[in-house]
Amino acid sequence: MTDLPQYTTSYNDYRSDTFTIPTSDIFAAGAGASVGDVIFQEDACTCLLEQRISQEYLGGKLYGGTEAQGLFCVSTTMSNQIAVRAHLNFAPPFSILCDKRAHIYVDECAGIAVLSQALVVPVVASNDRFLTLEDIQESYIPDDGDIHLAPTKLICLENTLHGMCFPYEELRRISDWCHEEGIKLHLDGARFWNAACSSGDDPVSYMRKVGPLFDSFSLCFSKSLGAPMGSMLVGGPEFRSRARHLLKQQGGGIRQAGFITKIAAYCLDQNFPLAVAETSAKTLDFWKDLYTTLKDEYGMELKLAHPVETNFIFIDLAKSGINMNKLLEIGERNNVKLFDGRLAFHYQNIKPEGLALLKKTFTDIAEYYQRNDYKPEGRSTRIY
Ligand SMILES: Cc1ncc(COP(=O)(O)O)c(C=O)c1O
Ligand SMILES: C[C@@H](O)[C@H](N)C(=O)O
């Protein structure tokens, strides 16, 4: 038997908020779950979670007053990819438009091209934060009969994207225009929970305000909510019916998943909104302290790639004069897990002991560069 990985804690893991681990109370929450077959829609815990998310959190209505219905999926990659195919329920050629940095484009294994046979039009956000309606209008492909083209039939937005919140007013402008043009709108809301907590509104009120702007949502349980797995795809009745068929076709038809959905519901109730909101607050506090310490005590000025708005700090390592491999080396020495300059925070790694190791990693790197020159390197290994 080869050596097995021994992952036991996430207090010092800043690679992603996907690394939260199920604790004893989370495992216990699965006890007594319903045991119906989800494929035949006979599992009470799964049906209940689908109803809660679509009705209680998204307010029951999508764009145009369409009734919101939930479909439990095993991952948000799956719910995103099924959403695209379910919307594009007619023959190609067509295209989908999204932010050039979007997970659905960058990190889902060319799923849109392979599974939906769609062209993807990746658009650079001119403000470097979120797509504006003008960015979209400049790049979308009109359905004007020109046989050279693949008309835009779906736009996928992401909120949050790289931890940044998408302003509500811009979402509304884009939604109004999309639907005038006959274009469907999907939200990759893997971290919509984080956006809701940073919206300035009551979090659920915010979610219900955004609900009617979109034709579908993907909402994830396995990131900031801390569940071990799960995603909710929300769309209208016809959309859900087609999505359920595609889910089965892609092997996403799971059987007695009641304990999974009961655990996801437990994590939702335990961590949203308070723990999710606290994580964002602690992320910003950590950033302010780190920036000030390195600047005042070490003369190193960290540069951000994006503003810190929720649970991510994106440090531009090159502009900060930090070699990624040296950062990872010093991180490992301090028992801190990192991918690169993206620091991801979650309710299990915002405790003092983990944050102290993370801060020491950066003060150690600052000390290193007091004695060594920064050597520019090629494109660093990026994860997201
Ligand atoms: C914005 C975003 N969307 C979708 C996904 C995919 O989620 P999953 O890992 O559950 O497939 C991720 C990452 O996990 C993500 O960060
Ligand atoms: C890597 C990517 O798939 C994951 N969603 C993350 O943000 O860590």
Image (cartoon, rainbow, N blue to C red):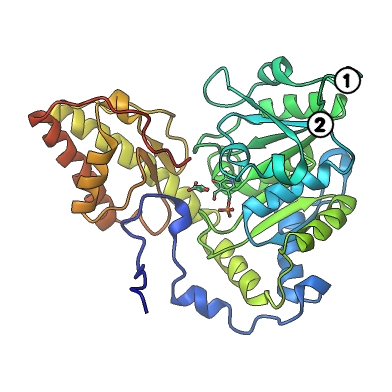
Q: Read off the residue under disc 1.
A: 147
| Closer-to-camera residue (242/264) | 242
Please identify the quarter of the rendering in which residue 1 is found: bottom left
Give the side of residue 313 with respect to residue 55, left or right: left
The answer to which of 168 and 148 lies nearer the viewer is: 148
Q: Secondary structure at mark 2?
A: loop
Cα separation, mark 1 vs mark 2, equals 11 Å
Q: Residue at x 83, y 41 (%)?
A: 88
- Image location (x, y in percent) of residue 347: 42, 56
User: At which x and y percent is residue 42?
Assistant: 81, 76
Disc 2 residue type? Phe
Q: Does residue 287 appear in this view?
A: yes
Q: Which residue is mark 2?
A: 94
Outermost residue on the front side: it is: 1
Give the x, y percent position of residue 170.
Answer: 67, 25
Residue at 71%, 82% in the rendered image: 35
Find residue 33 and report its horizontal and vertical position in percent: 65, 80
Tag 1, which secondary structure? loop
Crowd band around label 1 with a 10 angstrom C-alpha radius: few (<14), some (14–19), many (20+): few
Check the image and report above or below for 311 versus 265: above
Q: Residue at x 74, y 62 (%)?
A: 50
Q: Amino acid at mark 1?
A: Ile
